Image: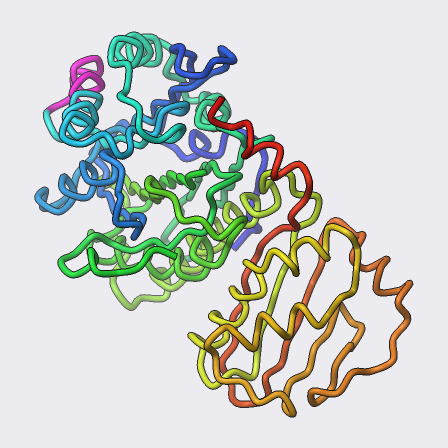
């Protein structure tokens, strides 16, 4: 399997997909703010969504549509930036459906074949006249080279688009997976399928991702593959600890009859899972790297936990600690903040068994501080990528989480975002 390619146009590098990104006046800047992605064949769809109980209208619309359509065949996804259509009540739900209907009409598609996503300011109605005009322009602009424009159109405070692509050849199977994502602030995804009972889950700017493939995959395999990939990627990143109302990851797989089907439990099924996870992980890390005001990507690995859940719990406590994140921004090797975060994480911890490293420099062994070169540690913290490792010495549980530092710029961006 080849490595993930992050160059432009990932979505439309997958055969059978066209895309467009246009401006319809939702962003005050006048920059592109509406993306349309169309599959030339009916595509099976899978989705995972925010567990924030204030779910945006597009989240509720997509989840309900995919739940009632069996099989969940979809032809297009329309995404707007600049307005989240969140906390907008019944009117917002009608607007989300109207957005889908406008796209279906403009594309000449049957009812219930278009999914929608939105991102931007919460609590404002979508200006449907602008959405309608934007969809019309986008349909006329659709192109097999339009992936890059679509990726740019979904950006909000993002500084760069996020794209990833992989092509796989294995035995009789050849398939591609391409994805685009957006996210820079309000990033702490806690994504799950919306099933009965999810409303009781506690939530952990919006993170959106659309991934497409030309592989022929059964619906139940597709949903399972997405959930497993997201668990190791998007659900392992954080910028500021705030879970959005709109977080969504959608996966489409065209169901071309001339392509061999990927069978459950087969070797190619395992290869598809790995490739999908690689694409999701690339997009997730790009989001963490582009966190609002960020100057460093931070990888945090906790191992030696009693189980994986405990390892993830401890890693996320470090990743969401403002004291740890500001210390990294200031290149201050104040390692006590890291252990304090682990100690309050809820994971099982025995201090006398705990080790801590910054990159290859060990700072703590069996709970005891070690002498280290502070200038060397500062230099490590000044690098574009920083690695923190903690070993709890209790078991085989291990998890890796990605975050970024917390700078003055983050406060500036979010103090002025709404206005």
Vertical placement of residue 313 versus 92, above or below? below
**Prevailing secondary structure class for the magenta stretch in the rendered image:** helix
Q: Where's residue 268, x and y in %? A: 36, 60
| Residue 381 belongs to the span the image colors magenta | no
What range is drawn magenta here? 101-110
Please name the residue shown 14% across and 42% down the image.
64
* Colour mode of the rendering: rainbow
Q: Camera-side residue: 370 or 166? A: 370
Vertical placement of residue 306 versus 311, above or below? below
Please name the residue shown 74% across and 49% down the image.
384
Q: Where's residue 145, x and y in %? A: 47, 21
Q: Camera-side residue: 398 or 274? A: 398
Is 73 displayed left or right of 253 in the figure?
left
Q: How many marks?
A: 0
Please name the residue shown 43% across and 57% down the image.
235
Q: Camera-side residue: 23 or 127? A: 127
Is 150 displayed left or right of 3 in the figure?
left
Quadrant hosting residue 410: top right
Q: Camera-side residue: 349 or 251? A: 349
Vertical placement of residue 383 versus 118, above or below? below
Vertical placement of residue 58 versus 141, above or below? below
Q: Where's residue 284, x and y in %? A: 50, 49
Please name the residue shown 27% across and 47% down the image.
47
Q: Where's residue 10, x and y in %? A: 48, 34
| Residue 105 belongs to the span the image colors magenta | yes
Is 230 displayed left or right of 407 in the figure?
left
């Amino acid at each position: 399997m080849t490595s993930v390619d992050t160059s432009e146009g990932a979505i439309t590098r997958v055969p059978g997909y066209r895309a467009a990104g246009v401006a319809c006046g939702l962003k005050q800047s006048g920059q592109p703010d509406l993306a349309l992605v169309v599959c030339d064949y009916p595509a099976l769809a899978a989705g995972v969504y925010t567990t924030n109980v204030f779910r945006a209208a597009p989240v509720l619309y997509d989840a309900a549509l995919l739940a009632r359509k069996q099989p969940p065949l979809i032809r297009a996804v329309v995404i707007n930036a600049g307005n989240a259509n969140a906390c907008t009540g019944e009117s917002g739900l009608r607007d989300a459906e109207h957005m889908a209907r406008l796209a279906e009409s403009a594309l000449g598609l049957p009812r219930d074949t278009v999914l929608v996503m939105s991102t931007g300011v919460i609590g404002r109605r979508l200006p449907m006249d602008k959405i309608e005009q934007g969809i019309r322009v986008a349909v006329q602009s659709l192109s097999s080279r339009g992936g890059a424009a679509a990726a740019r159109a979904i950006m909000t405070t993002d500084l760069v688009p996020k794209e990833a692509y992989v092509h796989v050849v294995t035995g009789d199977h050849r398939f591609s997976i391409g994805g685009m994502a957006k996210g820079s602030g309000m990033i702490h995804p806690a994504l799950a399928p919306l099933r009965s009972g999810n409303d009781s889950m506690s939530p952990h700017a919006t993170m959106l991702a659309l991934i497409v493939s030309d592989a022929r995959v059964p619906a139940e395999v597709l949903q399972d593959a997405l959930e497993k990939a997201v668990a190791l990627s998007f659900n392992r990143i954080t910028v500021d600890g705030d879970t959005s109302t709109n977080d969504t990851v959608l996966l489409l797989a065209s169901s071309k009859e001339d392509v061999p089907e990927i069978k459950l439990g087969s070797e190619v099924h395992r290869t598809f899972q790995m490739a999908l996870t690689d694409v999701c992980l690339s997009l997730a890390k790009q989001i963490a790297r582009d966190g609002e005001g960020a100057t460093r990507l931070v990888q945090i690995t906790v191992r030696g936990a009693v189980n994986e859940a405990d390892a993830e719990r401890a890693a996320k406590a470090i990743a969401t600690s403002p004291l740890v994140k500001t210390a990294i921004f200031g290149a201050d090797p104040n390692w006590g903040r890291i252990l304090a975060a682990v100690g309050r994480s809820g994971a099982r911890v025995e201090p006398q068994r705990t080790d801590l490293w910054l990159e290859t420099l060990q700072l703590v062994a069996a709970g005891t501080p070690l002498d280290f070169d502070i200038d060397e540690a500062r230099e490590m913290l000044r690098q574009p990528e920083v690695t923190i490792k903690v070993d709890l010495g209790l078991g085989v549980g291990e998890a890796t989480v990605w975050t970024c530092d917390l700078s003055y710029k983050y406060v500036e961006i979010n103090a002025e975002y709404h206005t």
